[in-house]
Amino acid sequence: MKVVTFEATPNIAVVKYWGKRNTQLILPTNSSISMTLDSLKTRTSVAFDETFEKDELYLNGENVDLEKNSEAKERLKQLDAIRAKAGINKKAKIVSINCFPTAAGFASSASGLAALACAASKAAGLKLDSQELSILARLGSGSASRSVLGGFVEWMKGEKEDGSDSYAVQLADENYWKEMRVISVVVSQGAKSISSRTGMQQTLETSELFKKRLAYLPAAIDSMVEAIKEKNFELFAEITMKDSDNMHACMADTKPPIIYMNETSKKIIDVVKELNAASTIAAYTFDAGPNAHIYCLEPHINKVIEALEKLPQVEQIILSKAGSGPVEISDEKEHLLDPVTGEIRKHFFDKGKNKIIVG
Ligand code: DP6
């Protein structure tokens, strides 16, 4: 049986996506910009076969019951789109593993669904470009649409009702702004109080401030494109922090209020403010959780990490550069599914023996 394996990585938005104009097709209210990371990889193997009776998903070694877990089933919508495009009706087996400590507290939906779009479309015999892959990944999770490309990426919101113009494009590849780094600061591994999927719709429906956000965003997107083009860190940092603050202000303005940041997150903001007192060297950004991502340039990494390490509540620090986007793993031994038996290769999931290394 044909098994296809891809690895993909998350992206960290600097102009955020928060709000859908179409919840079925996952069409956003605004365009967003992110950098794809080179670390925190998710590896996904996919096979379609006539002997499979139903679609099956294994996440980090555990079977996910798609009959009972409607959210997981919803996120796999792209499988039907792939089958329709390829003209097949075989069921799929999907095996996915996060190649980083699961305790790190990072969402893996962007990397997982981008890896799935690449692996499943190829396993179904399709040869798709990044635009088509981005649209498929988007059907599972909005932010995944950006992880099908490396470097700096813009997810264009599009105008059409069918979503055919809502996909990601690359602004600059991973080698363009070589000094750029992201320091991810893990402060909490607890589950979210409210999922981003539910939270963003509540914001859209109830926040007055959100209307202002939508009005300011097109100019923020233009300035961010300019900042990346000119490698202007000061401008890049200003827009990144302003947009994170703005999104979290809209979350707080939601009825009932949504608060993802905790006391440590606020302390991290203070640390960054202090670091930037003389000149801007670091930019914080927060997604739907208390963990921080700090953008900074290579010469300042040690200074920034030293300052963050002083906070006793910081549990883990992960350093990333810009990544290349999804990569196919063609070495047969590295597939998570055995191409002969169609069985999961259990040794990849044995605790303590995980062969796949962080990074
Ligand atoms: C806060 O992509 O997780 O990280 O489309 O409902 O799956 P769904 O949401 P998701 O949203 C994450 C939004 C964010 C900001 C961003 O990455 O742009």
Image (tube, rainbow, N blue to C red):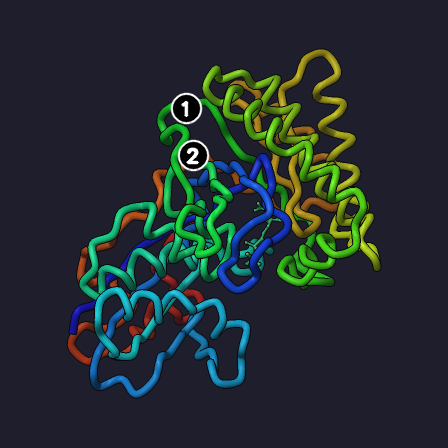
Is 131 above or below relative to 228?
A: below
| Res. 56 image quadrant | bottom left
Q: What element carries label 2?
A: loop
- Image-based side of 281 in relation to 278, left or right: left
Q: In this view, does 213 lie to the left or right of 346?
A: right
At 51% from the left and 50% from the top, the residue drawn is: 143
Front residue of 337 and 155: 155
Q: Which of 71 and 181 is in front in this view?
A: 71
Q: In this view, does 125 lie to the left or right of 324?
A: left
Mark 1 residue crowding within 10 angstroms, few (<14) / some (14–19) / many (20+): few
Query: x, y percentage for residue 34?
Result: 51, 37
Q: Which of marks 2 and 1 is nearer the N terminus?
A: 1
User: Which residue is under mark 2?
Assistant: 322
| Amino acid at the residue labelled 1 | Lys
Residue 92 lies, with reference to residue 43, above or below; the image says: below
Q: Which of 78 and 310 is in front in this view?
A: 78
Q: Is mark 1 within 8 Å of ligand 1?
A: no
Distance from disc 2 to disc 1, alpha carbons, whole Å, reads 8 Å
Q: Mark 1 points at which residue?
A: 178
Residue 119 circle label:
none
Q: Is residue 279 above or below residue 41?
A: above
Residues under numbered marks 2 and 1 in contact, where contact means CB atoms less than 8 Å apart: yes
310 to 256, vertically: above or below:
above
Instruction: Count residues near mark 2 (Cα–Cα under 10 Å), then give few for <14, some for 14-19, many for 20+.
Output: many
| Image quarter in which the C terminus is found | top left
Residue 322 picture quarter: top left
Amino acid type, label 2? Ala
